[in-house]
Amino acid sequence: MAISHSNAARNAMADAVDAQVNTGSADASGDFVLIASGGPTDLVSIVLQDPAFGAAASGVITLAGTPLSNTASATGTTDTFEIRDKDNGVVIDGTVTATGGGGDVEIDNTSIASGQTVELSSLTWTAPV
C-alpha cells in the first residue's frame, strides 16, 4: 500500500513551503530565478510577493500577484529554476523547458537575452498525495 496524506496534512506541508520562502532578512522578498545551468548563470531574478504564495487548498499553493516580471541581467538558455528565500537560500528547484517539453516549469522561449523582459504568469506547488 502506498503512503498517502490527509488533505489537512498536505495543506500544512504546502503552507510550510511558503513559510520557508518568506523566511530571512537579507531581502524584502523571496525570488524566482531562471538559470542557465552550464555556468551556472542567473539569467533573471523575479521578486516575489510576501507572502509568496496564497493559502493552501487541497495541498496546492499558488504564486501570489501574478503576473510578475523583471528584466534579464544575462543572456543564455535556461534549463533550471530556483525559488529562493529572503536570505537567497534555495527552497525549491527544478527543470525548465519550452512549453510542452515536460519541465517542472514550462515557458514559451528558453532563450533569454540580457535586457529582455521575462514574465512569470503563474506557478503552483503541490504537496505529495
Image (spheres, grey):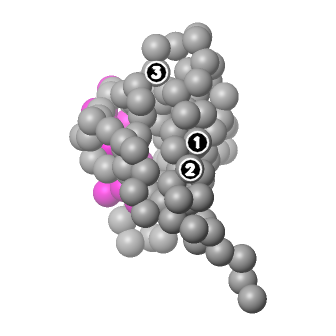
Kind of residue indicated by mark 1 = Ala
- Asked which quadrant contains residue 60, the reply is bottom left
Q: Residues within 10 Å of mark 2 (few under 14, many from 20)?
A: some
Look at discs 2 and 3 and give the one toward the viewer: 2
Q: Are marks 2 and 3 in contact (CB under 8 Å)?
A: no
Q: x%, y% of residue 24?
A: 60, 18
* Residue 5 drawn above or below residue 87: below
Label 2 secondary element: helix
Residue located at (48% from left, 60% from top):
59
Q: x%, y% of residue 11?
A: 51, 54
The residue wearing badge 2 is 12
Which of the image's four quarters has the C terminus? bottom right
Label 1 secondary element: helix
Q: Are marks 1 and 3 in contact (CB under 8 Å)?
A: no
**Is residue 116 rendered magenta in the image?**
yes
Q: Residues within 10 Å of mark 1 (few under 14, many from 20)?
A: few
The residue wearing badge 3 is 29
Which of the labelled discs sits on residue 16, or is there none? 1
Residue located at (57% from left, 43% from top):
17
* Residue 33 drawn above or below residue 28: below
Residue located at (52% from left, 44% from top):
15
**Is residue 65 rendered magenta in the image?**
no
- Asked which quadrant contains residue 47, the reply is top left
29 or 118, nearer to the observer: 29
Kind of residue indicated by mark 3 = Ser
| Residue range corresponding to the magenta coloring | 106-120
Q: Residues within 10 Å of mark 3 (few under 14, many from 20)?
A: many
Q: Are marks 1 and 2 in contact (CB under 8 Å)?
A: yes
**Mark 2 or mark 3: whose residue is earlier in sequence:** 2
**Mark 1 or mark 3: whose residue is earlier in sequence:** 1
Look at discs 1 and 3 and give the one toward the viewer: 1
